[in-house]
Image (cartoon, grey):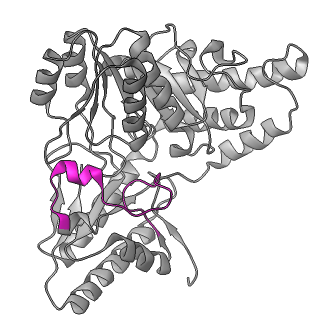
């Protein structure tokens, strides 16, 4: 139908789940501060603790290991605050991390006076284990290492088990930004050997503005934000009870992963359709594992900014890489790190599916994408080579 919109940007933010919406609204009807001792306060506290249990269960830890924050960015900064507190003398993070991790690493490095180094990745976007092993061997005591579970732009999954073995072999600490994996694939912190992780509610159908810093085992947390001593002194500030309640419900639904195989089927159908229409299609990273819902597409000669406008006018919402750059369309540092050619990287668009995505949505995107490529060919007067950047 004319005027219908198709949302294919779940890695930026997922639509609010109806049950999470109801939980947010119900909590907003309350008037208690979760730190108050009266009944209204205790009712608010009960909502927070119920949500804490749900978030903890999602990643396989005890509730006391979960600290609520304002989102993934704050949680990443809180994670890096632990580096100096735990005696780390060097910091490493992968070259394909979200900007909030890179900035948190640099801030922690400056505050503690310790060096910070990027870990290179291969052409699939996965951390080079050989390079990591060498860096760790020369990195001093208790290195602090951050490697995301799944890349927000390409969906590439990192070999966290092997990374954890290398990091712990040098007595180090492993943090993982896990905001993209929850609800798409099973993620158990302890099984993978991750010491601390970051989660975000709005990536799993919860409300915006709430996230969590999670420990594998309960331990002292050096606060970055101090004041009233909320969250056991780990993160001061009055709890956002309604958002936390919605986060808890979304976490419970995400734990079921009911939509994972549906997303994989639809994503694979999207790529098969493109390949059938453009025989020389390439799939970057097809030899490694990735999220079931993500494809990062590019074509020679396309410009992402122009392409996004064309797709938006066609009723499609997608992104050019990360959506956390103040609305700017900039060259992807992830594709740069993977060594993707500039003429392909310049037109990269990320398509990410979710629980509301349908077969019709996939068909609509494929039609619009192919038309955009054909228009580019006519405009440039030369051939165009379609490519899909995968994980």
Q: Quadrant of residue 383?
A: bottom left
In the displayed structure image, the side of residue 58 where residue 288 appears, left or right: left
- The majority secondary structure of the magenta stretch comes to loop
- Residue depicted at x 76% and y 20%: 45
Q: Quadrant of residue 298?
A: bottom left
The answer to whether 249 is drawn above or below residue 303 in the figure is: above
Q: Is residue 70 visible?
A: yes
| Image coords of residue 281 (percent x, y) | 16, 69
The answer to whether 178 is drawn above or below residue 175 in the figure is: below
The answer to whether 316 is drawn above or below residue 127 in the figure is: below
| Image coords of residue 384 (percent x, y) | 16, 79
Q: Quadrant of residue 211?
A: top right
Camera-side residue: 312 or 18? 312
- Residue depicted at x 40% and y 18%: 112
Q: How many marks?
A: 0
- Residue depicted at x 20% and y 11%: 170
In the displayed structure image, the side of residue 61 where residue 158 appears, left or right: left
Bounds of the magenta segment: 317-342
| Image coords of residue 349 (percent x, y) | 34, 64
| Image coords of residue 221 (percent x, y) | 52, 13
Q: Is residue 329 magenta?
A: yes
- Residue depicted at x 73% and y 17%: 228
Image quarter where the N terminus lies is: bottom right
Q: Is residue 237 magenta?
A: no
């Amino acid at each position: 139908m004319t005027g219908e919109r198709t949302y294919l940007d779940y890695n930026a933010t997922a639509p609010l789940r109806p049950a999470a919406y109801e939980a947010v609204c119900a909590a907003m009807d309350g008037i208690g501060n979760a730190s108050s001792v009266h009944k209204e306060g205790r009712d608010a506290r009960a909502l927070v603790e119920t949500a804490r249990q749900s978030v903890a269960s999602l990643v396989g830890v005890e509730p006391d290991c979960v600290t609520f924050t304002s989102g993934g960015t704050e949680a990443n900064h809180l994670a890096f605050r632990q580096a100096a507190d735990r005696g780390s003398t060097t910091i490493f993070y992968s070259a394909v991390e979200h900007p909030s991790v890179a900035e948190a690493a640099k801030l922690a490095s400056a505050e503690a006076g310790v060096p910070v180094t990027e870990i290179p990745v291969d052409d699939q976007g996965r951390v080079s284990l050989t390079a990591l092993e060498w860096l760790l061997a020369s990195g001093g005591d208790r290195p602090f290492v951050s490697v995301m579970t799944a890349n927000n732009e390409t969906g590439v999954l990192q070999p966290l088990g092997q990374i954890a073995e290398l990091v712990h072999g040098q007595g180090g600490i492993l943090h993982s930004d896990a905001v993209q994996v929850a609800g798409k694939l099973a993620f158990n912190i302890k099984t993978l050997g991750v010491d601390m992780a970051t989660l975000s509610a709005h990536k799993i159908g919860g409300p915006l503005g709430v996230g969590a810093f999670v420990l594998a085992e309960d331990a002292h947390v050096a606060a970055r934000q101090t004041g009233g001593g909320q969250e056991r002194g780990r993160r001061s500030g009055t709890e956002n009870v309604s958002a936390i309640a919605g986060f808890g419900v979304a976490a419970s639904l995400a734990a079921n992963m009911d939509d994972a195989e549906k997303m994989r089927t639809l994503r694979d159908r999207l790529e098969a359709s493109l390949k059938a229409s453009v025989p020389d299609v390439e799939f970057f990273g097809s030899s490694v594992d990735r999220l079931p819902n993500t494809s990062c597409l590019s074509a020679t000669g396309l410009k992402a900014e122009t392409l996004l406008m064309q797709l938006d006018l066609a009723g499609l919402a997608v992104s050019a890489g990360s959506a956390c750059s103040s609305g700017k369309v900039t060259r992807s540092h992830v594709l740069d790190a993977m060594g993707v050619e500039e003429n392909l990287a310049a037109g990269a668009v990320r398509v990410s599916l979710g629980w509301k995505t349908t077969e019709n949505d996939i068909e609509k995107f494929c039609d619009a994408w192919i038309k955009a490529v054909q228009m580019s060919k006519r405009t440039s007067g030369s051939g165009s080579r379609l490519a899909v950047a995968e994980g």
